[in-house]
Image (tube, rainbow, N blue to C red):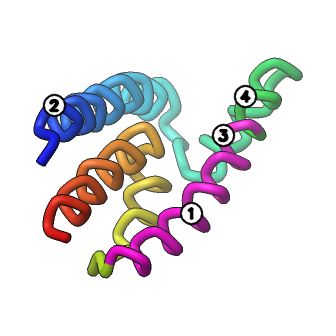
Amino acid sequence: MNSSKQIFYAVMAIVGACATWYFNLQAMELDPNFSFASFVRDNYVNPSSASIANDIAVILVVFFFWSFVEARRLGMKHWWVYVPLSIFIALAFAYPLFLLMRERAIAKH
C-alpha cells in the first residue's frame, strides 16, 4: 500500500474543498439572491473566466466518464457519490477523494 499517495490525495481533497468554499461562501454573502444558476452565470462574466469555466466543465465530464469506468474495473461501490460531490462541493475535492479511494481499492487487490 502506497500511503504517501493516499496522504497526498487526502490533503489535496481537503485543500480543494477549503480553497473553493472560501470563495463560494464569499459569493453567497455578497449576493442575497445567490443560486446555482447565478453561480454558473457569474463564471461567464468575461472571456477569461468563460475559458476557465469551459475548461473545468470538460474536465468534469471526462472525470465522470473515467471514474465510472475505473470504479467498475476495480469494483468500487457507490461511484455515483462523486457526481454530487463534484457539483455541490467541488471537483477539486471530489477528484482527489476519488483518487484516494481508488488507491485503497487497488491496495485491496
In the picture of the structure, the residue carrying the numbered disc 4 is 52
Tell me whether the residue at label 3 lies in contact with that at label 4, contact meaning CB atoms closer than 8 angstroms: yes
106 relative position to 25: left or right:
left
Measured Cα–Cα span from mark 1 to mark 2: 23 Å
Q: For residue 66, which numbered disc appears in the image?
A: 1
Dot 2 or dot 3: first in sequence order is: 2
x and y, in percent, of residue 18 in the image: 28, 28
Predominant secondary structure, magenta span: helix
Measured Cα–Cα span from mark 3 to mark 1: 15 Å
Q: Which residues are magenta?
A: 55-74
Q: Is disc 4 surrounded by few (<14), some (14 to 19) or many (20+) residues within 10 Å?
A: few
Q: At 61% from the left edge and 52% from the top edge, which residue is drawn?
A: 60
Q: Is disc 2 surrounded by few (<14), some (14 to 19) or many (20+) residues within 10 Å?
A: few
65 relative position to 53: left or right:
left
Measured Cα–Cα span from mark 4 to mark 1: 21 Å
**Residue 20, quarter of picture:** top left
Q: Amino acid at mark 1?
A: Trp
Callout 2 secondary element: helix
Q: Amino acid at mark 2?
A: Ser
Measured Cα–Cα span from mark 3 to mark 4: 6 Å
In the picture of the structure, the residue carrying the numbered disc 2 is 4
Dot 2 or dot 4: first in sequence order is: 2
Measured Cα–Cα span from mark 2 to mark 4: 30 Å
Q: For residue 56, which numbered disc appears in the image?
A: 3
